[in-house]
Image (spheres, rainbow, N blue to C red):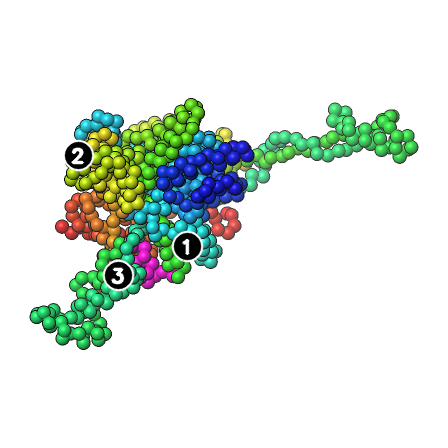
């Protein structure tokens, strides 16, 4: 033990690998962050950065609740002492506040005045996990005559009969050795047809399930940016949700005002048209597309219609009738109305009276309600399935 | 590896001899070489044995990230304890370790000799370990969430303790408070004397005052504004269970232990930087080592823009004191009777008696503020601007920012507001407003601890303002 006359010291180096406290509490923190995200899902899922993204990136969500709150001075309204490089003058500008900056917490000295605002990183997939754990596909039907698609084969059996190209040489020789040994002449010789062994395979059958979303949206003059954004957010998550349930999910976009046409995704969300609204046109178009391309026997069909509810009154009756026809072919029909100012809606007044189980409707009044809409259309069902 | 350790031990021996020669006075040292994540864990928790809490995990993650990205590096961590534990980062070069060993010896000298640390518990490593154990026991009994929510609430007011070094009337806080309350109550019963001897007549009344006190106009509970929120709530809250009081008192002990370090940050770092430089100068270094030392040293004491590097500021003030007491001016010699050559002696005295506030107030001179190019800056519109370069204002502003460790000074004004049992806190406003968002989110924490409506009185835009929270809603009231 080295020691000087007066003071004692020890130098040691231990194995710290079991000291995991920092990581454990870090996990605890992360868990709390997740909980908060869950509480704030309605806000997060309509974040523009997500809806407009390609869905692959990691997104940053602002976290307001995981700060360690305490009584602190208002950093912005406080005087501070700083240090220059020798020739600072009164009136020198040190920096500007970017609008996002908030007061730093407690500690005075940071690199810049007040930069401590909380952000958590989360991948869209994680967000999906949290969101979709609350959703379920209602009215799911077994499509009996699903395309049986053979996706792969697997060699997993040995038989005495088979085709030559699949011969299992190792097992054949082993058989030969065994037979020769029992007959008292060990060694590999005289392979007889009896020794031959063949590999055989099994088909891996994946039931092929398809779903198609018929996304219909009112693009008449009365549908503004907000209405479209809500619809877009909804379809964004709906598509991702269905992709988890089905192997293949196709989307057909139908835009309509007084007449309907099939459009590309981009046009669907961006192009605005003017004019009045006749919703039945879209339903007609949907029926036409279903009948020509998506036989209900092999497709799970989800028609969803977004509108501001401002339909030509005389058209309503026809709409109700067509919805009935669509329901005959579809798993469910969803009608979402974006109605931010609580106007009277001609369409809703007609739809209120539809008492079909698989017809669902929801009114979105603000961005946060997109989450409610998702939950309402894809709610977890109690008891048995319909 | 073995030879590396031997070399390090040899150097430590040498460094300690030099330090002894300079008169540094420290506890026995325990040097522990640890990997980075352990050092950062200790940095985040303030102590290796501290209890578990998500906020430490958050800090740890932040610090570790900075380290991983090469943005910052902690080379050492030293703990105020006897023996004194110093943690060295595994992978430090020998010369880095030499600097650090010298640096931590000076820290330890400071812990041992500075007056603010006189009452700190030098066995805190063990105490904190026991606390951590107790808290995790409570988690088992009462559930992790219940304990965590409670600890969250306590941590929200943890800075509001009273690190009193002197106990009034040599009584503990509770006895003192009770005694004062009794005096106040009795005081209300005494008849105001009209002749110098009238009070003699009321002696009887004084001793037999058993009747209920009249409604007092001044709050008598607490008898004096109480700075120690944690203590007051832990002692007088009617909603707390025993385990909760226990946690509060343990966390309060921890805060009181850390408090002197918050009060002496500039001095302590300045002192350690001063000494590592002096000690390393005495060592025989190779050319290469000298350069490496210079690099590390300059990264430690490097002045930074906009914020103040406490290492640098403290170092410069200590050097300035030494110079001024070594070579006093004629005036200083005549007016203050200062004799030349007393520099060392003086800085040892300063390290014993001062804290950051008095250190700055007494020793940050006009020349220093100019040499260091210090300034006062504040926000004007969207811009942060230098607004003042007069040295007195710089000095006062800096001292002000160190009051109460930088946290707002808040006292318990009334623990039984209008006899309703509500709690009134008062912010001792000295020109710096509180952050309202934080204020309104902290009050529910205080409510959780007190169990009844809590009010906080402060000043906003030169107007008295009262913020309240009753468990359901927030209220704001401005009194002009």
Residue nearest the observer in this picture, B461 or B173: B173
Element carrying mark 1? helix
Chain at tag 1: B
Element carrying mark 3? helix
The quadrant in which the N terminus of chain B is found is: top right
Q: On screen, B306 above or below B458?
A: above
Q: Which comes sooner in the sequence, label 1 or label 2? A: 1
Q: Which residue is mark 1?
A: B146
Picture residue at 70% right of the left edge, 34% below the top: A156
Say which mark, if any, is on residue B169. 3
Q: Which comes sooner in the sequence, label 2 or label 3? A: 3
Q: Quadrant of residue B20?
A: top left
Q: Position of residue B316 (x, y in %)?
A: 28, 33
Report whether mark 2 lies on the same chain as mark 3: yes
Q: Which comes sooner in the sequence, label 1 or label 3? A: 1
Q: Which residue is mark 2?
A: B330
Q: Nearer the viewer, mark 1 or mark 2?
A: 2
Whether residue B10 is visible to the viewer of this picture, yes or no, is yes
């Amino acid at each position: 033990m080295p020691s000087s006359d007066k003071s004692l010291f020890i130098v040691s180096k231990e194995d710290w690998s079991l000291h995991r406290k920092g990581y454990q509490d870090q996990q605890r923190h992360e868990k709390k962050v997740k909980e908060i995200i869950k509480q704030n899902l309605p806000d997060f899922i309509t974040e523009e950065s997500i809806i407009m993204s390609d869905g692959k990136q990691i997104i940053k969500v602002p976290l307001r609740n995981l700060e360690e709150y305490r009584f602190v001075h208002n950093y912005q309204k406080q005087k501070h002492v700083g240090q220059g490089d020798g020739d600072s003058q009164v009136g020198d500008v040190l920096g500007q506040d970017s609008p996002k900056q908030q007061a730093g917490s407690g500690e005075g000295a940071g690199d810049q005045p007040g930069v401590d605002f909380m952000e958590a990183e989360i991948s869209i997939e994680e967000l999906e996990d949290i969101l979709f754990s609350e959703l379920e596909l209602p009215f799911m039907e077994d499509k009996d005559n699903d395309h049986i698609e053979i996706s792969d084969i697997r060699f997993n059996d040995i038989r005495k009969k088979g085709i030559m190209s699949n011969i299992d040489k190792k097992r054949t020789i082993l058989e030969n050795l065994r037979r020769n040994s029992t007959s008292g002449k060990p060694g590999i010789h005289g392979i007889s047809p009896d020794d031959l062994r063949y590999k055989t395979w099994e088909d891996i059958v994946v039931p092929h399930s398809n779903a198609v979303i018929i996304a219909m949206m009112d693009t008449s003059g009365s549908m503004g940016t907000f209405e479209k954004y809500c619809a877009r957010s909804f379809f964004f998550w709906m598509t991702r949700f269905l992709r988890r349930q089905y192997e293949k999910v196709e989307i057909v976009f139908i835009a309509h005002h007084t007449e309907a046409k099939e459009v590309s995704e981009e046009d669907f969300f961006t192009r605005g048209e003017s004019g009045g609204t006749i919703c039945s046109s879209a339903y007609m178009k949907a029926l036409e597309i279903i009948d020509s391309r998506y036989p209900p026997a092999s497709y799970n069909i989800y028609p969803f219609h977004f509108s501001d509810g401002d339909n030509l009154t005389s058209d309503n009756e026809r709409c109700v009738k067509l919805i009935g026809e669509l329901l005959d072919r579809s798993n469910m029909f969803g009608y979402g109305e974006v109605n931010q100012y609580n106007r009277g809606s001609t369409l809703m007044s007609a739809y209120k009276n539809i008492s079909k189980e698989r017809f669902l409707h929801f009114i979105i009044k603000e961005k946060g309600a997109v989450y409610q809409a998702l939950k309402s259309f894809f709610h977890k069902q109690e008891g048995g399935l319909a | 590896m073995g030879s590396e350790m031997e070399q390090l031990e040899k150097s430590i021996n040498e460094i300690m001899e030099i330090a002894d020669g300079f008169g540094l006075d420290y506890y026995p040292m325990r040097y522990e070489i640890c990997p980075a994540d352990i050092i950062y864990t200790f940095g985040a928790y303030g102590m290796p044995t501290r209890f578990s809490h998500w906020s430490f995990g958050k800090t740890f993650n932040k610090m570790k990230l900075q380290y991983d990205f090469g943005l910052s590096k902690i080379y050492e961590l030293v703990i105020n304890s006897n023996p004194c534990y110093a943690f060295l980062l595994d992978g430090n070069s020998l010369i880095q370790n030499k600097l650090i060993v010298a640096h931590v010896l000076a820290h330890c000298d400071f812990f041992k000799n500075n007056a603010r640390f006189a009452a700190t518990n030098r066995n805190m490593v063990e105490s904190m370990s026991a606390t951590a154990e107790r808290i995790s026991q409570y988690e088992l009994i009462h559930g992790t969430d219940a304990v965590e929510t409670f600890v969250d609430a306590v941590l929200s007011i943890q800075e509001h303790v009273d690190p009193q070094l002197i106990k009034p009337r040599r009584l503990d806080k509770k006895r003192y408070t009770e005694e004062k309350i009794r005096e106040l109550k009795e005081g209300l019963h005494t008849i105001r004397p009209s002749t110098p001897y009238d009070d003699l007549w009321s002696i009887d009344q004084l001793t037999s005052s058993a009747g209920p006190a009249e409604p007092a106009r001044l709050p008598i509970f607490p008898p004096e504004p109480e700075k120690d929120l944690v203590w007051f709530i832990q002692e007088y809250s009617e909603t707390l269970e025993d385990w909760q009081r226990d946690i509060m008192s343990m966390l309060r002990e921890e805060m009181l232990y850390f408090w002197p370090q918050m009060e002496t940050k500039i001095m302590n770092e300045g002192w350690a930087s001063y000494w590592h430089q002096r000690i390393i100068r005495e060592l025989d270094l190779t050319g290469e080592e000298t350069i490496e030392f210079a690099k590390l040293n300059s990264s430690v004491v490097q002045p930074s823009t906009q914020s103040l590097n406490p290492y640098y500021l403290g170092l410069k003030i200590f050097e300035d004191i030494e110079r001024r007491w070594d070579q006093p001016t004629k005036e200083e010699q005549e007016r203050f009777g200062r004799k030349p050559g007393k520099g060392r002696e003086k800085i040892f005295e300063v390290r014993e008696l001062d804290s950051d506030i008095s250190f700055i107030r007494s020793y940050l001179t006009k020349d220093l503020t100019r040499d260091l190019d210090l300034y006062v800056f504040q926000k004007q519109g969207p811009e942060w601007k230098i607004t003042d370069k007069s040295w007195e204002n710089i000095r006062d502003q800096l001292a002000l920012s160190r009051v109460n460790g930088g946290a707002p000074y808040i006292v318990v004004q009334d623990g039984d507001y209008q006899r309703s049992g509500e709690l009134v806190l008062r912010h001792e406003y000295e020109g710096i407003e509180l952050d309202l968002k934080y204020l309104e989110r902290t009050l529910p924490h205080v409510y959780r601890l007190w169990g009844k409506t809590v009010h906080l009185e402060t000043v906003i835009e030169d107007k008295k303002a009262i913020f309240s929270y009753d468990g359901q809603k927030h209220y704001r009231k401005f009194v002009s």
